[in-house]
Amino acid sequence: MKAIVYDQEGKEAGSIMLPKEIFDVAMNSDLLHQVVVSQMSNRRQGSAHTKDRSEVSGGGRKPWRQKGTGRARVGSNRSPIWKGGGVTFGPRNDKIFKKEIPEKIRRKALFMVLTEKFKRNLLTFVEDLNLEKPKTAEMVKILKNVKCKENCLIVFPEYDKKIILAARNLPGYSTVEARNLNVLEVMTYKNLLITKDAVKKIKDTFVKIK
């Protein structure tokens, strides 16, 4: 499998052989759905929390005597039916949303998404991303040259502060190191801009398990 590689000016700078084990994987929508759901669940913070009747303040004594008042019997003003009382079946911060998915399946799902992006011509390969300064204007110029104008994830091989700073203020754009690539992030963005070395890094990182 061969793909065109562009330079930062948007001109063809050669080609790259794409590994079939990454960019030629059959789609399995059920497997992909499992991975996406698990990653979304693992990102949930679960910070919403309500107090039940044992946690709210008050309720030290019985509001009124059991019999003789003509009113319904009640034992505590912390009851859920009282204003200021505890909450029944409310969200709790001790709930665990984490879902475990085997590493092989996560990697296969990633390859499926990359394959689909490649088939739909949503992947753009560049020789390299060299910025003199971490300026947003420089990054905009490069993206315009390679015709990656909207909703794009920029994938580079190693940590590069200049790239991160230059792209962070662009709405609809994000950056990620090749080793941190994941299904949910790839699916979030319509286009992907990948450097030549990043392809090699993806292969070295993810093509391990047979």
Image (cartoon, rainbow, N blue to C red):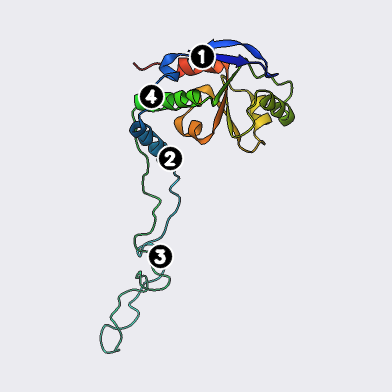
Q: Are marks 4 and 2 in contact (CB under 8 Å)?
A: no
- Considering only order in the chain, which callout, 1 or 4, is on the residue closer to the N terminus? 4
Mark 2 Cα-neighbour bin, 10 Å: few <14, some 14–19, many ≥20: few
Q: Which residue, given by chain and number where applicable, does mark 2 sit on? A: 40
Answer left or right for 107 relative to 156.
Answer: left
Amino acid type of the residue tagged 4 in the rendering: Lys
- Considering only order in the chain, which callout, 3 or 4, is on the residue closer to the N terminus? 3
Q: Which residue, given by chain and number where applicable, does mark 1 sit on? A: 200
Secondary structure at badge 4 equals helix
Mark 3 Cα-neighbour bin, 10 Å: few <14, some 14–19, many ≥20: some
Mark 4 Cα-neighbour bin, 10 Å: few <14, some 14–19, many ≥20: many
Q: Is residue 179 above or below residue 36?
A: above
Image position, residue 102 (x, y; %): 33, 28
Secondary structure at badge 3 equals loop
**Viewer-nearest of discs 4 and 3:** 4
Q: Residue at x 50, y 31 (%)?
A: 186
Q: Which residue, given by chain and number where applicable, does mark 3 sit on? A: 56
Q: Are marks 1 and 2 in contact (CB under 8 Å)?
A: no
Q: Which residue, given by chain and number where applicable, does mark 4 sit on? A: 108
Secondary structure at badge 2 equals helix
Whole-Å distance between the Cαs marked 2 and 3? 32 Å
Q: Is residue 102 above or below residue 92?
A: above
Choose between 90 and 22: the one closer to the eye. 22
Image position, residue 14 (x, y; %): 61, 10
